[in-house]
């Protein structure tokens, strides 16, 4: 049965065979591992997201998509990110 409020349909537990369910679970696990490895090797992602969220919480903009567009198209953002990466690396040394 469809959940009209969320736009999602209910689960069809018989849609996948046990073998397909096992393959799907393995795929999900491997995807999570790959994503974790990627994020650990790209520290700038954490800095970009935490910086954006910090600015959202401080400024509380009315229009989040517009604010995000302005934030992520800031010409100084790459320089700021590199500076923060260097500062973080210096703190670890």
Image (spheres, helix red, strand yellow):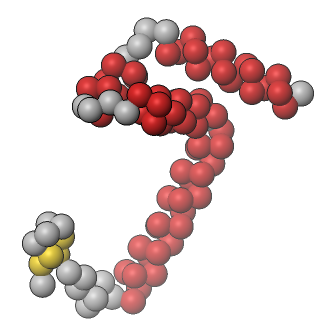
- Asked whether the viewer can see residue 91, the reply is yes
- Asked whether the viewer can see residue 52, the reply is no
Q: Position of residue 10 (x, y in %)?
A: 20, 81
Q: How many marks?
A: 0
* Residue pictured at 25% horizontal, 31% vertical: 63
Q: Position of residue 32 (x, y in %)?
A: 53, 59
* Residue pictured at 73% horizontal, 19% vertical: 86
Q: Position of residue 26 (x, y in %)?
A: 50, 72
* Residue pictured at 66% horizontal, 15% vertical: 83
The foreground one among 92 and 25 is 92
Question: Residue 82's image quarter?
Answer: top right
* Quarter of the rendering occupied by the C terminus: top right
Query: On screen, 60 above or below 26?
Result: above
Question: Residue 81's image quarter?
Answer: top right
* Quarter of the rendering occupied by the N terminus: bottom left
The foreground one among 89 and 41 is 89
Query: On screen, 77 above or below 43?
Result: above
Q: Position of residue 61 (x, y in %)?
A: 32, 30
Horizontal placement of 23 versus 68: left or right? right
Question: Residue 23's image quarter?
Answer: bottom left
* Residue pictured at 32% horizontal, 26% vertical: 67
């Amino acid at each position: 049965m469809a959940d009209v409020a969320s736009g999602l349909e209910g689960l069809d537990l018989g849609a996948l065979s046990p073998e397909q369910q096992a393959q799907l679970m393995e795929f999900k696990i491997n995807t999570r591992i790959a994503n974790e490895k990627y994020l650990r090797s790209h520290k700038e992602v954490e800095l970009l997201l935490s910086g954006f969220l910090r600015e959202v919480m401080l400024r509380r903009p009315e229009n989040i998509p517009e604010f995000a567009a302005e934030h992520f198209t800031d010409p100084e953002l790459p320089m700021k990110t590199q500076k923060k990466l260097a500062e973080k690396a210096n703190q670890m040394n």
